[in-house]
C-alpha cells in the first residue's frame, strides 16, 4: 500500500508538473507569436469591463473634427483594430484621415467622425456597443460598421455562430459551473478556459483544421450575421440614422491584380497558401455572398489593388499609414455618394450631373 501511494504521489507530481510546463510553453508560443505578428507581447491593448458591451478600450480621439457643437453631421465608425487604428498616432487613423479630407472639402457642411473601433470587436460585439451608445447618446447621421476580418478569424477559432473575442473564457466562467462536475472547482475551471493552453488550442484549430464551405455551423454563422446586420439597419432607421456595412479589404482576400513591383516589396507573414488562409477566406467569402445584395452593403475587398506602394502590415489585415489614407479616401467618396449628394441634389437630373462631374473620384 505504501508503494502504491508513493507511485500515486509521484504520478500526481508529474501530472501537475506536465500541466504547468504545457501552460508555460503555450504562454511563450502565444506571446512570441504576438510579437512576431503585431510587434508586441500582448494581443490588443488595455480594456475595461462594461456591462453592456462586455469590455471596452474607450473612444479613440479623432483629429481634424470641427469644434464641439458646430458640426452639422456626426458619423459613428465601428469595427475592430483596423478601424481603431493599428498605430500609436491618433491623427493617422481612418477616421482622422477622413475628417481631414471631408472638412477640407466640405467647409460649409463640416462633420465629426467618431472612432468607436475596439480591438478584437466583430459584428456581434459592435451591435452590443451600438445598443449601449444609442441609450446614452443622441443618434448620429450615419452608423458605419467596418467588418470582415474579425468575424472570419473568430469563427475559424471557435467554430460557433456566437464566436467573438474571449468567447471561451466568458462562456466557461458563466456556464460550466453547472455543466460539468469539474465546474464545482470554479476558480480552476475559470483558469482552464482562460489559460494560454486553451488559447493555443484555439489558434491551432484556426490554422490547422480546415473549414468545409458547406458545413452547417458555417451556414448558421452566416445566418446569424445577416440577421444581426438587418437588425442594425432597422434600429438605425428607427433613430433616423443611415446604416452602412463596409466590407474591409485584406491582402489575403484580394482578387484584382496588383502591380508586380508592389508585390515584390510586400513582406507578409503566412502569405503562402495554408489552412489558416483557407479558413479565413471560406468564411469571408461566405459572408460576402450572403450580404452582397443588401442595400447597406459596400464591398471594399479590392479597393487597395491600385496601390503604388505597400499598404499592409505583416499580418495582411492591418494597414500602414498609406493604406489607411486610401481607405479614408474611399470612405469620403462613399459617404458623399450615399448621403451628402442625395440630400443636397435630390432630383435624378442633379444626381446624374454630379456623378458625371465626380466619376473619376467615385470609381
Image (spheres, grey):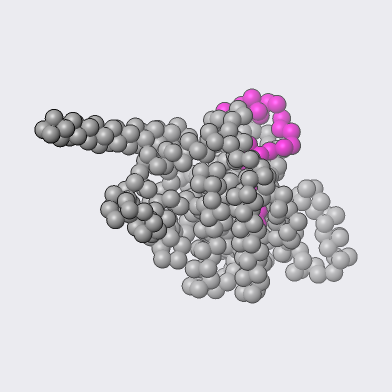
Residue at x-position 76% and y-position 64%: 341
Work out whether 209 lies above or below 339.
above
Q: Quadrant of residue 325?
A: top right
Task: Tell which of 278 and 185 is nearer to you.
Answer: 185
Q: Is residue 249 magenta?
A: yes
Work out whether 202 lies above or below 219.
above
**Residue 144: in sight, yes or no?**
no
Q: Quadrant of residue 357?
A: bottom right
Residue 40 left/right relative to 185: right
Quadrant housing the N terminus: top left
Residue at x-position 64% and y-position 57%: 223
- Residues in magenta, as a range: 245-267
Residue that sits furthest to the front in the current view? 1
Residue at x-position 48% and y-position 36%: 204
Residue that sits furthest to the left in the current view? 2
Q: Position of residue 186 (x, y in %)?
A: 29, 55
Amino acid at each position: 500500500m505504501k508503494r502504491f501511494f508513493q507511485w500515486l504521489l509521484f504520478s500526481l507530481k508529474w501530472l501537475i508538473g506536465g500541466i504547468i510546463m504545457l501552460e508555460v510553453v503555450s504562454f511563450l508560443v502565444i506571446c512570441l507569436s504576438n510579437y512576431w505578428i503585431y510587434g508586441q507581447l500582448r494581443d490588443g491593448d488595455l480594456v475595461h469591463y462594461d456591462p453592456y458591451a462586455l469590455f471596452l478600450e474607450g473612444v479613440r480621439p479623432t483629429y481634424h473634427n470641427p469644434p464641439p457643437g458646430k458640426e452639422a453631421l456626426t458619423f459613428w465608425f465601428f469595427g475592430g483594430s483596423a478601424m481603431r487604428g493599428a498605430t500609436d498616432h491618433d491623427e493617422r487613423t481612418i477616421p482622422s484621415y477622413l475628417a481631414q479630407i471631408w472638412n477640407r472639402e466640405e467647409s460649409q457642411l463640416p462633420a465629426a467622425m467618431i472612432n468607436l473601433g475596439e480591438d478584437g470587436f466583430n459584428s456581434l460585439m459592435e451591435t452590443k456597443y451600438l445598443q449601449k451608445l444609442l441609450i446614452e447618446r443622441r443618434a448620429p447621421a450615419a452608423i458605419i460598421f467596418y467588418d470582415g476580418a474579425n468575424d472570419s478569424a473568430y469563427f475559424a477559432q471557435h467554430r460557433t455562430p456566437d464566436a467573438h473575442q474571449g468567447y471561451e473564457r466568458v462562456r466557461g466562467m458563466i456556464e460550466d459551473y453547472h455543466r460539468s462536475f469539474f465546474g464545482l472547482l470554479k476558480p480552476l475551471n475559470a483558469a482552464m478556459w482562460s489559460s494560454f493552453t486553451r488559447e493555443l488550442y484555439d489558434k491551432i484549430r484556426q490554422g490547422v483544421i480546415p473549414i468545409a464551405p458547406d458545413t452547417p455551423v458555417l451556414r448558421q454563422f452566416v445566418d446569424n450575421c445577416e440577421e444581426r446586420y438587418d437588425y442594425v439597419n432597422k434600429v438605425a432607421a428607427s433613430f433616423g440614422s443611415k446604416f452602412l456595412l463596409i466590407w474591409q479589404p485584406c491582402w489575403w482576400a484580394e482578387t484584382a491584380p496588383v502591380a508586380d513591383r508592389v508585390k515584390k516589396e510586400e513582406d507578409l507573414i503566412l502569405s503562402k497558401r495554408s489552412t489558416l488562409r483557407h479558413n479565413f477566406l471560406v468564411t469571408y467569402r461566405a459572408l460576402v455572398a450572403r450580404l452582397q445584395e443588401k442595400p447597406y452593403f459596400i464591398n471594399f475587398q479590392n479597393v487597395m489593388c491600385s496601390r503604388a506602394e505597400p499598404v499592409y502590415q505583416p499580418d495582411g489585415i492591418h494597414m500602414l499609414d498609406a493604406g489607411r489614407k486610401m481607405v479614408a479616401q474611399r470612405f469620403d467618396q462613399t459617404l458623399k455618394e450615399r448621403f451628402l449628394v442625395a440630400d443636397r441634389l435630390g432630383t435624378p437630373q442633379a444626381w446624374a450631373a454630379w456623378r458625371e462631374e465626380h466619376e473619376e473620384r467615385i470609381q
